[in-house]
């Protein structure tokens, strides 16, 4: 036993525990969560009329007198089992807004719908991947720092230079960090601009737009290899009551496309004036992609769009090469972060700018690990489709935790820790692998030709 690794010895200890069966049941219930949260307490369900106890649960009967629940982290690099669950919820949330379901009428698939991509502007030339030369130039001149303006190499998609600036000294790291910090405001103003353009093109007073139509959306932020965020969004035009209401006759795909492009080109957010930086005018990049989503199947597939969005929601920083999955607490954390020199430079700029009083509201040091971007990875308008909370409640009912009407539930819980012991982590990884394998087998069986 002493010659075995610590994780193996601990796993054997757990397996010999008299309550191992119940411990394994908790592990299965969390799907093999890599970082479960441990709670201690009880819950009692009473009949609201008679006061009779219908159900009582107490963790004193559990292994270690605690109950383990999922961490619900969306990042695959942090917890793969919970990220898969989150990806599934995201898929159904986006899909319901495209084709209906989850209390959304099927008629939404016939509404004007677009799959929109908005990019960040250029902050300086970077190395690009592809079949063509990276940054070809006829002249072989250098920048003021002595580095070539161009690059004639052909880079593989996974090449280490892809996304890195041709000249780090010429790259505008300050504008990059501040653009990230204001990206949420840029999106808000973009949505307002779309509504205003639709109203103007239909001959409406802008303040009356909500009485005639409603703009619904779900958007996801994706980091490019250069460390800049760009946005993928499903945009839908409904009637004033949302998905249950038909849009007005003037609400067409062509008019929605024009409004999206017009708004993306006009939106400007100006930063607060800083003695060190000045005032910057922040805009979307010039590359704007609008693809109509058609019910006749001639456009992008609805399921593919939903799966595309769900995939990027669960990507961790280690997968995208943009920052880290954990917050930075001091300057030394930047020096030791496992990132490229380009990303490290962005982190340092965020840390420096975060120390300026005029940028204090942006919390740039708090968000230095995400390169200044402080928005949610996925956001949606209220009327787009269902919610994560509704999907989780539906899943709870599916596994037998149904809500009982005319009852009162008394709860008393407290946090007592998180994570696994070395042996527990080993067993949890095995459970997660088995569940993933079973899911793949079931999918293959469903998709197999009959």
Image (cartoon, rainbow, N blue to C red):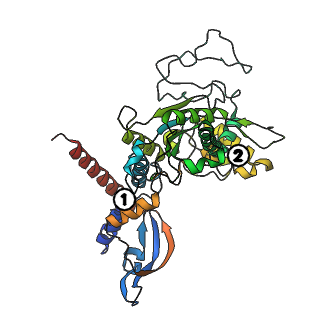
Q: Residues within 10 Å of mark 1 (few under 14, many from 20)?
A: many
Q: Is residue 181 visible?
A: yes
Please tell me which residue lies in front, 11 or 119: 119
Q: Position of residue 67 (x, y in %)?
A: 41, 72
- Reading the image, the residue beneath label 2 is 351
Mark sitting earlier along the chain (2/1): 1
Q: Is residue 71 visible?
A: no
How far from the left and from the top, in percent, is residue 310?
43, 46
Q: Is residue 359 above or below residue 28?
A: above
Front in this rendered view, residue 240 or 357 = 240
Q: 187 or 139: nearer the eye?
A: 187
Q: Are marks 2 and 1 in contact (CB under 8 Å)?
A: no
User: Which element is circle 1 on?
Assistant: loop
The residue shown at (70%, 46%) is 351
In-image side of 279 versus 190 (left or right): right
The residue identified by callout 1 is: 32
Packing grade of label 2 (10 A; few <14, some 14-19, many >=20) is many
Q: Where on the picture, by quarter, is residue 399?
A: bottom left
Q: Which residue is farthest top?
A: 138
Q: Which mark is residue 279?
A: none
Q: Please indicate whether residue 364 sits to the left or right of residue 106 in the image.
A: right
- In the image as oriented, which residue stretches furthest toward the left? 450
């Amino acid at each position: 036993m002493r010659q075995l690794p610590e994780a193996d010895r601990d796993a054997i200890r757990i397996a010999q525990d008299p309550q191992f069966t119940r411990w394994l049941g908790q592990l299965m219930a969390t799907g093999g969560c890599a970082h479960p949260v441990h709670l201690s307490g009880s819950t009692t369900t009473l009949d609201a009329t008679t006061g009779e106890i219908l159900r009582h649960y107490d963790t004193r009967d559990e292994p270690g007198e605690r109950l383990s629940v999922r961490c619900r982290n969306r990042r695959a690099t942090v917890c793969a089992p919970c990220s898969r669950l989150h990806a599934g919820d995201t898929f159904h949330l986006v899909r319901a807004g495209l084709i209906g379901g989850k209390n959304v009428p099927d008629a939404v698939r016939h509404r004007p719908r677009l799959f929109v991509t908005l990019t960040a502007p250029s902050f300086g030339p970077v190395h690009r991947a592809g079949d063509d030369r990276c940054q070809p130039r006829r002249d072989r001149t250098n920048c003021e720092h002595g580095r070539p303006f161009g690059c004639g190499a052909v880079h593989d998609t996974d090449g280490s230079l892809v996304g890195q600036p041709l000249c780090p000294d010429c790259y505008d790291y300050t504008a990059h960090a501040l653009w990230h910090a204001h990206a949420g405001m840029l999106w808000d103003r973009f949505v307002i601009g779309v509504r205003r353009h639709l109203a103007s093109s239909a001959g409406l007073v802008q303040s009356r737009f909500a009485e005639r139509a409603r703009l619904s959306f779900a958007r996801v932020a994706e980091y490019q290899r250069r460390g800049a965020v760009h946005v993928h969004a499903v945009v839908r035009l409904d009637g004033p009551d949302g998905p249950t209401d038909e849009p007005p006759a003037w609400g067409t795909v062509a008019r929605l496309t024009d409004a999206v492009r017009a708004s993306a080109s006009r939106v400007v957010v100006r930063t607060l004036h800083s003695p060190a930086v000045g005032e910057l005018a922040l805009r979307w990049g010039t590359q704007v992609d609008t693809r109509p989503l058609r019910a006749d199947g001639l456009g992008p597939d609805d399921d593919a769009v939903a799966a595309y969005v769900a995939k990027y929601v669960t990507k961790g920083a280690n997968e995208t090469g943009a920052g880290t999955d954990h917050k930075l607490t001091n300057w030394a954390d930047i020096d030791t972060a496992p990132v490229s020199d380009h990303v490290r430079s962005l982190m340092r700029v965020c840390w420096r700018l975060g120390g300026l009083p005029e940028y204090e509201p942006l919390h740039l040091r708090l968000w230095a690990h995400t390169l200044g971007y402080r928005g949610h990875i996925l956001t949606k308008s209220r009327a787009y489709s269902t919610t994560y909370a509704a999907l989780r409640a539906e899943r709870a009912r599916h596994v037998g935790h149904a809500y009982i009407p005319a009852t009162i539930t008394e709860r008393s819980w407290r946090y007592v820790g998180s994570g696994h012991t070395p042996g527990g982590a080993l067993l949890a990884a095995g459970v997660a692998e088995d569940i993933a394998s079973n899911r793949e087998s079931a999918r293959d069986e469903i998709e197999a030709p009959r």
